[in-house]
Amino acid sequence: MNDRRKFELIIGTFDAERFWRDPNQAKLPSFHDAEMENVVMAMDELLFPFCGAQDRLITRYGMNTSHKAYLHEIGFQFLSNSTDLERPDGGSAGRTANIFDLLTTTDHVGDMDPDWLNGARLSPFALIPGAERAAMRLGLEQDCPSVETVQTVNSKLYSTELNRRLELQCDSQTVYSHEELLSSGLALLKQGPFLIKDEFGVSGKGNLLIESEAILQRVTSYLADQCRKGRTVRFIIEPFLLKELDFSCQFHIDPDGTYRHISVQQLVNHNFAYQGSYTADDRLLHKLHEAEYFDVMKLAARELYQSGYHGHVCVDSMLLRDGRIVPIVEVNARRSMSLIKHYVDRYLEQHGTAGSMTHATLQFAGDVSFDQLLESLDREGILYKPDQGFGILPLSANTLFINKVVSECKGIRNKQVKGRLYYSLIEGTGDNERLSAKLEEVLLSLSFKIAR
């Protein structure tokens, strides 16, 4: 067994963009959802597919014991902390601290022996401030680019310039004041709706569709108020394109610059937010080869490497209704949800099947538990098992119950809360509509309300 599989420390946070973004920059209007912020904090449990038998997974909150036992039973092997790094009701202080901050401010890593990480190699979901400090404190091996480099290449400004350097069609422009946004936005509206993009917007946050002058006026007024308080403006604006589908390409840039293709995933997005991934079909792959899309990915990898970056990359792309391909919508120089899906696929391939990855946002009150969910799925014959070849493979538990835990930590029981269940839907020889319907029946029987 090689060192990588023996000593990798898998760790990360799914709101990395928050730590790359300049706090002095003005923000676009958005709805604050504290419960969904808690869900994002618990998403690091989704990193388990990256682990091999001797790898260590550190999560902010210890993984649910029943969930971990189920994953081990079906063949996922990994070691992880079983206690929390912080109290789930950490409040604003908890929201400020990233997981690397927690590692450097605690005298222990959950309930783990101090030597538990000895000799491990740091393998983060995304490189953010504090990672290097944590690696030094814990004696971790690391071979990562600088945080400053990672911050630069993850900016949408970089993606815009990358399109220009590769001489790809690019109608994006950067605005540096609310006045410039208004004047340039009015010009764009003459051709149709347009998007305002935050430099580090992600998954539904930081992308705003402008369809009328009235909306544009309100947004610029909102930004002007922030400018009067000393904030700076820097946004990307571009025409809103009519797309047929979203997809992404995952690849890796080795430390010597070697490009390694990993996968192409078709995406399900709603209001710019990620809903799920499934393997690209032959029709799309044929179009991509015809359009020399993968040559563009190799060129993008070369540019990223010349900018000082190596590691995992996920490039978001689009197929438009008129048949054109937009190869680079934005660059995510990190691991991704689609890469997680690919690693789940690698596991499923060993058992002769495949799946798609999605989630359900649920509301509930009362004392329902993850044990009950697993038991109900099993009783109905839809809990995935390798010898069965189809079913629902739950990929998360803490994301579903985190707000229930937070509420109970505050002494409030039976409050209606929101959570999210991530899962792989494995069809086998059956059909996914039947599986989805059976899952919905199970969730309703346990008094979960599905948020549409």
Image (cartoon, rainbow, N blue to C red):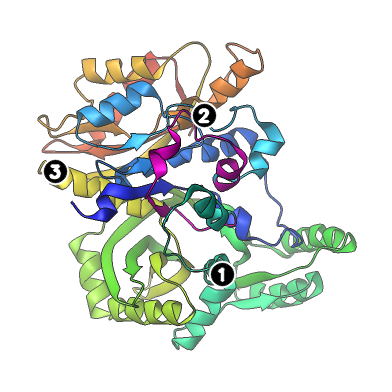
Please give the label number shown on residue 26. Answer: none
Q: Is residue 361 left or right of residue 177?
A: left
Say above or below: 214 vs 118: below
Q: Where residue 349 sits in the image (x, y, percent)? A: 14, 47
Question: For the residues marked 1 and 2, what is the alpha-carbon distance in whole angstroms?
Answer: 34 Å
Q: Is residue 114 left or right of residue 186?
A: left
Residue for point 58% across, 41% down: 102
**Front residue of 85 and 337:** 85
Mark 1 or mark 3, which is nearer the start of the sequence? 1
Q: Which residue in the rendered view is the most extreme toward the right?
A: 228
Q: Which residues are magenta?
A: 100-129
Which residue matches tag 2? Answer: 84
Q: Is residue 296 left or right of residue 53?
A: right
Please give the label number shown on residue 353. Answer: 3
Report helix, strand or loop for mark 3. Answer: loop
Q: Which of the two marks, 3 or 2, is nearer to us in this view?
A: 2
Mark 2 or mark 3, which is nearer the start of the sequence? 2
Q: Where residue 114 sits in the image (x, y, percent)? A: 45, 36
Q: Where residue 332 sits in the image (x, y, percent)? A: 46, 64
